[in-house]
Image (tube, rainbow, N blue to C red):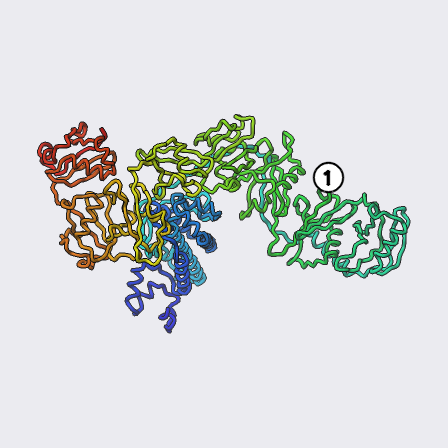
Amino acid sequence: MDILKHSSEDYSSMKLSEFIRNTNYDDRFAQQFQQYRIKDFSLSQIKSICQLYEQSINHFQHTFINVSHLIRVPLDKKLNNELDHILKSSFISSNDHTKKEEFQVKIRAITEFLNDLKDTEDVLVSQWAQSFTETCKYLCIENLIVKLIPKEIKCENYVPLCLKLIDIRSQLQERTFDIEEKTIHLWSARFDISNISQSNENSFQIFRNKNDDFLLVESKLISSLDDFSSPSFPQPTDITGDLIDWSDMFDNVIIPTEPLKSEHFLSQTINYTSLSKLKLTLISLSPSALFENSRKQAEQLATKVSNIRLVITCLDGKQEKYYCKPEKLYIQLKKLFDKKKYDLNTIGLIDPNQLLIDFMKTNINNSLPIIETEYYVIEKKLLFPIVLEFENNQWEYFATAEATITSLLSRFILDQQLKFTSPENYFSVFDSLGRYIAVDYQLNNIYRSNEQNPIHIRILRCNHDANICCEMTLMTGQEETHCQYFNPATTWKEISLWSKILGIKTEIPVDNYYFWNTEQKHIINEDETISFTLSQAESINVDVLNEESVMDVMLSYDKNIQTIRILNSCPVHSLLSNPDYLKQLDLKISPQECTLVFVSNESEKQILKDLDMENPISHYASMTDKSVHFQISILIQIIQYDNQKEIPIPISHRNITIKELLGIIEINNDHTYLASYETKIILSENTKLSTINETKFFLIKEHQTCLVSIQQSEDVLMTVIEDNIQNQRYLINATINDIYKQNKNIDQNQYLLYDRDFVPSRDTPLSSFLFTKTSPIQFNLIYQKLQANVTVTSDEQKSSIEFQCESTMTIGRVHQIVCQLWKLNTKLYRLSLSDDSIIDEEYSLDDLREFINDLQLKLISITNIKCEITYQDEILMISTTSETLLSSILKETLEKLLIPLDDIDRFELNLIDDPESPTNVDLDLSIDDIHLDYFTESNIIPFQLQKK
């Protein structure tokens, strides 16, 4: 920037790559251009580009400062690839005609989503183990991006998810600058040059894909932001590498290597017959003729010179003539009524506009009345009441059948001394059904439910910036169309009355109309306003139904019960798919973790299976003479750890303990436990389900668990270890990471030290530390990161061992740790560097200083004979010596498979000399006996472990 700013030359028309190649500035420019994969752009846009990346960096800081480690967990490779593909195919279109405004809409959607997530970070931390999309629904985050995110992504993946969204937003912002740049070039193009001077190439070709690196996909498959509700995910054919990948900055670069398969979601068709169809559309209204005439009439009356002569026609037809000033008018009228002995409760006075004059009250603001030339005494029974609603207040007027709306509104404007300046400030008028009134007519033509009720008129103040009205178009089967404007505050109960007034032709008389929201698939509540129904949409479609198509069902959860009006042809599972129903019942778990129970009576309840849930609700109505009642039950999944079989248990509420849950599945063995599916911690029998947000558990026995003890150093100033985490029991296949996840009070800068000299990686299984049945696995909580990072691999093991330690640790101690965790005989193995260089065991890691940050070691067997043990789907490789007995091989195999040694008599080893018919072997034989007799030409002896 400084070079360009102080240069005497104009480089604005030059590309960045051209500037680097053709100028004699520092060579580091060219190196950085290649190293950081900088996207090429015109130098005329450099200020905007700098601002863009400055904003992006700020967004990174905004997102990640003080974010808990519980929601920083990286995505696995499969999910990472899937999410990359979904976001790119949904946002990064290869369409050359994509408009700048479309990119801006997508940028705004991402920004709003990130802001919503930032506001809910604390909740995401508390729900780290739950589905991200389900948590967003629970938090009422209504953003279309939520529908794109795979359900397998959890709240713990919050940070990498935000990184990807920020990356996508940056690419979209870059493309808006590209469009602006192309527009500049387009207006600079010369179309006045003769054809001779131009090439035969299409003149517009230079503006297409100029130095653009787009994701190359089938353009017809690209889903736009408008198609979020059912996105299609195209398969990428190429991924270019010129765009900056923000995940590089966080050492989490995962490049997709294979295309994803599109997901297909089947939607079940709901069959019903509609009487007619409604289309609701938001529109803007200009000032009506009714408003203009009322305002002008009010202005004329306000500026009119008041008369001093008036004539009053009495009930007997005789006239009384008076001369008086305005301030004496009401006094004179009272004298007349006293003189004629008129009862003010039954007799009144109307003006020439047929409106009642209430001369017993003082005008608002003590203003003087305007004297008309004529007044008429009339019986009040010939008048009808009118209630005007305006800005949450009501005023009552009385008028004859001949009075007009304009006369009433002009009187109201004068009484309230309102000021309107069209078109900036005006009002719209609606009747009691919410219908828009645009022209003048007699008041007695305005709808009222019966003659005893007053006429209701609603006045809504408007301005040219916000005068929203709803246009409702009714389409019948006879292709008749009725169009009506409505107040957005109109309820569907009033729309139903309007439908009755129109008199829709039906074969059977209809007492009540019901309205089916075709987008959201539910019956609209009659007390709901049309503005609420429209929500953020500009237009929706609604089907009009009669009572034969709908029914009321009872839906209950725990002690809450609601009556739901629904289509009788709806499948039962639709009761669980509507978030409004679940919200009414205060259900705060995912519907996927629930099931429905049909309650025919208190003693008969049927748990509905998947096929049952496809049945229409009318199917169950035919099975009972009572109201149809469905009970939402939480579907608890109990997974037997031994065989992975699932036991589904529906419960009506979460206010039960683990002990009670075990009682439901008829498990009375004291040595049987339930473990959390997420963190694999053993749950206390007094724990209530309401305190843990989980519905899936492992059913285990005591020998399948291990006890973990966490201690704190005595020299720390503050104690963070609580009593409930000093001794915790976990599944034996749990990992160190499960301990961190379970104990949220362990800070991200604290570490679990084992054996007082090394910190195992989070992926290390707890079974690696099991050496006796009863001894706990002891860790110490430390507050500093150890200097050396060690990774050890072995051809015999499926995964590596990683840990941190002090740089003073010796290679011999590393050897002991590795053999201890893999349960190997140290005498049969040695360590080497990754290049197979032998290391003296007395060397410390300091002696290998260039490798200390990432020391890669290999554990190599020094024996010539190995046993290959096959058990179910697992294959173990065990190094051994000729003198080793097969009983020792069996014992070592059971230890590696985490099978209790107490069960050793239940297993046997078979020699796979013949795959079709293995040979049972005596455990007192040695490896040498087997090797000499059967496998003299091979150093790998195959065995099969199986139960007797």
The answer to whether any part of residue 473 appears in the image is no
Marker count (numbered): 1
- Check the image and report above or below for 607 versus 797: above
- Check the image and report above or below for 568 versus 30: above
Quadrant containing the C terminus is: top left
Quadrant containing the N terminus is: bottom left
State left or right for residue 533 relative to residue 126. Answer: right
The answer to whether any part of residue 372 appears in the image is yes
The residue closer to the viewer here, 703 or 432, is: 703
* Residue to which mark 1 is pinned: 450
The image position of residue 810, as x and y in percent, is 18, 55
The residue closer to the viewer here, 535 or 64, is: 64
Under circle 1, the secondary element is loop
Q: Quadrant of residue 643?
A: top left
The amino acid type, in three-letter code, at marker 1 is Asn
State left or right for residue 297 relative to residue 806. Answer: right
The image position of residue 110, as x and y in percent, is 44, 53
The residue closer to the viewer here, 379 or 39, is: 379
The image position of residue 271, as x and y in percent, is 52, 32
- Check the image and report above or below for 617 versus 788: above
What crowding class fits label 1: few (fewer than 14 Cα within 10 Å), some (14-19), or many (20 or more)?
Answer: few
State left or right for residue 499 relative to residue 400. Answer: left
The residue closer to the viewer here, 321 or 362, is: 362
Q: Residue at x 58, y 42 (%)?
A: 279
